[in-house]
Amino acid sequence: MNTYRDNYETLPDAEGLGHVTMNNDSEAIDYKARIAHVQASQDYLTARAKRMAARVAQRSTEE
Amino acid sequence: MASPYLSVWRRSFLVTCGQAAAKGLEDHPSKPVFSEDSLHLDAIVTRYGELREQFVSQHGMVGGLLANHKVAALYISILSRTPPEHLFTFTHETPIGERRLALAAMMNAVVLGVLQIDPATVNEALQDDLEYCLLKEPPSNLEWICFGMHALCRHLGRPTNIKNY
């Protein structure tokens, strides 16, 4: 089965793309940094959770 | 297999995401509390490791490393199949339909964390669509989740090495 996964190629120019991990040579995930990022984004995640809650509530009242 | 500490880090990451979801819903009537010591969480981390290895061996990734969008897709694939009660406790009168809310909020945190999404750059319409899917039943096809996560990365302007035709 041919899927897009068979079509990877290396980036032609990696200069200045040190932060990019979207290729086959991805750096190992720095979980410590990811954890800090999630914690730092709490306000945003709370806003989204509330928005989802409102959405769910709205749908349940429709039924 | 990489460092034995990796599964500890993966677990810590999921705990952080679960706690962020619970915190985000602390005013909600379902009052979800994340079960940090849940054995189901250990099972999820194990399952993630297995699925990841399978994925890597099938697709021959260099150095056994996966692109971020695939990592996110693997987590979503597993979490979306997890009954919310395995990871959260709720007030007993919480309707079944509202329990997935906590899980969806957790998956949102996983995506944000793995893809390193800056909240300031989020397109609200796209995020609404993502959340709609997270609130729904588990997707059956990992490939489609990969596609969705990759599309998100593309939208955020992350360079990618997937060949353009």
Image (tube, coloured by chain):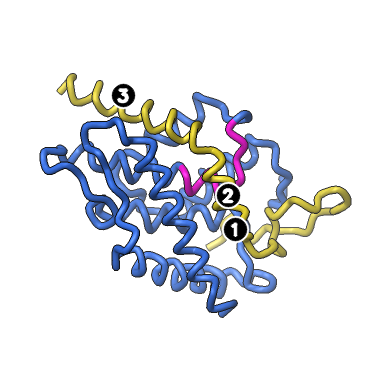
Chain colours: A yellow, B blue
Q: What element carries label 3?
A: helix
> Decide: marks 1, 3 in contact (CB < 8 A)?
no
Kind of residue indicated by mark 3: Ala
Q: Relative to A52, does residue B6 appear above or below in the rendering?
A: below
Query: What is the span of residues highlighted in magenta in the rendered image?
Result: B109-119
Residue at the extreme left of the image, as rendered: B93
- The verdict on a common chain for dots 2 and 1 is yes
Mark 1 or mark 3: whose residue is earlier in sequence = 1
Foreground of the two, A62 or A53: A53
Q: Relative to B35, does residue B128 appear above or below in the rendering?
A: above
Q: Is mark 1 on a helix, strand or loop?
A: helix
Q: How far apart are marks 2 and 1 (CA)?
A: 6 Å
Kind of residue indicated by mark 2: Ala
Dot 3: within a 10 Å radius of its alpha carbon, few (fewer than 14), some, or many (20 or more) residues? few
Q: Percent from the top left, x then y, of residue B42? A: 36, 68
Which residue is disc 1 drawn over? A32
Q: Is the magenta stretch mostly helix, strand or loop?
A: helix
Chain letter for mark 3, please: A
Q: Is residue B59 left or right of residue A54?
A: right
Residue B158: quadrant of the picture: top right
Q: How far apart are marks 1 and 3 (CA)?
A: 32 Å
- The verdict on a common chain for dots 1 and 3 is yes
Q: Is mark 2 on a helix, strand or loop?
A: helix
Which residue is disc 2 drawn over? A36
Which residue is disc 3 drawn over? A54
Question: Magenta span has B115?
Answer: yes
Q: What residue is at 28 percent from the left and 47 percent from the top? A: B33
